[in-house]
Image (tube, helix red, strand yellow):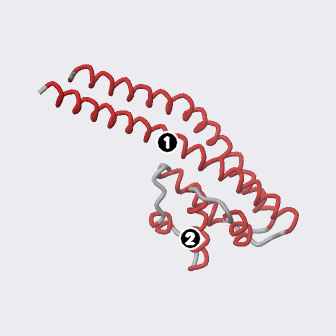
Amino acid sequence: MSVLKIIAGGLLALIACYVGLLIKRRYRDRADFFKSACEYANSMSSELALNKTPIPEIAEKFVQGRKGDFEKLLSESISIMKEGGYNASSSEKVNVPILKKEEKKEVMGFLCGSGKSALTDQLAQVTHYKNLFEQKFKKCEEDSKRLGGMYFKLCVLLGLAILLILA
């Protein structure tokens, strides 16, 4: 009977560690998302200012060779824009599990709201969102280092405590 308790405790400890790993990965993915958003805003700013490249071409060029949540969202937003434009129900169709509701609206407003005004207004809008995304990236990176690691360690300790209790 004690062997079964040890096996069950080991499995519960592994599950607790895996939950901690998932939490840590979520924090890291949020930081990666906003890092990609900052890179896209920088790319968009330079392309608009120097070459006056159309926004769908900027997005397609940015997405090439990249895999991530931001790139998927960017591709979806370009397809939404090609279908007929952005509205409030469009942001509900898009699924980005790592973003909060208001963050998703901000990002979709940036991605789908571009290209509807004069060049100087677009550049000002891109600069505004670039600053916003940089702030969010710094906060998410700090949270990833601080909270992600802490939750992972707490879950490992919880797993060890379960193992000791059942052993």
Q: Is residue 77 left or right of residue 26?
A: right
- Are discs 2 and 1 less than 8 Å apart at CB? no
Q: Disc 1 designates what residue? A: 25
In the visual, does 93 lie left or right of 73?
left
Does residue 88 appear left or right of residue 140 in this picture? left
Residue drawn where x is 54% and y is 28% of the image = 146
Name the residue type under label 2.
Answer: Tyr
Q: Amino acid at mark 1?
A: Arg
Tell which of 86 and 150 is nearer to you: 150
Q: Tell which residue pokes out farthest to the left in this image.
A: 1
Kindly indicate the quadrant of the structure image that contains residue 156: top left
Mark nearer the N terminus (2 vs 1): 1
Q: Nearer the viewer, residue 112 or 160?
A: 160
Choose mark 2 or mark 1, whichever is in front. Answer: 1
Residue 14: x, y in percent?
A: 34, 35
Q: Secondary structure at mark 2?
A: loop
Could you tell me which secondary element the residue under label 1 belongs to? helix
- Please provide percent x and percent y for residue 64: 68, 65
Q: Residue at x 50, y 29 (%)?
A: 149
Q: Which mark is residue 86?
A: 2
Q: Examine the rendered structure and indicate whether residue 162 appears above or below residue 109.
A: above
- Quadrant of the frame with the C terminus: top left
Instruction: Residue at 58%, 38% (x, y): give it.
Output: 140
Residue 46 placed where, x, y %? 82, 58
Occupied quadrant, residue 48: bottom right
Tell me if mark 1 has few (under 14), some (14-19) or many (20+) residues whose alpha carbon lies within 10 angstroms of its own: some
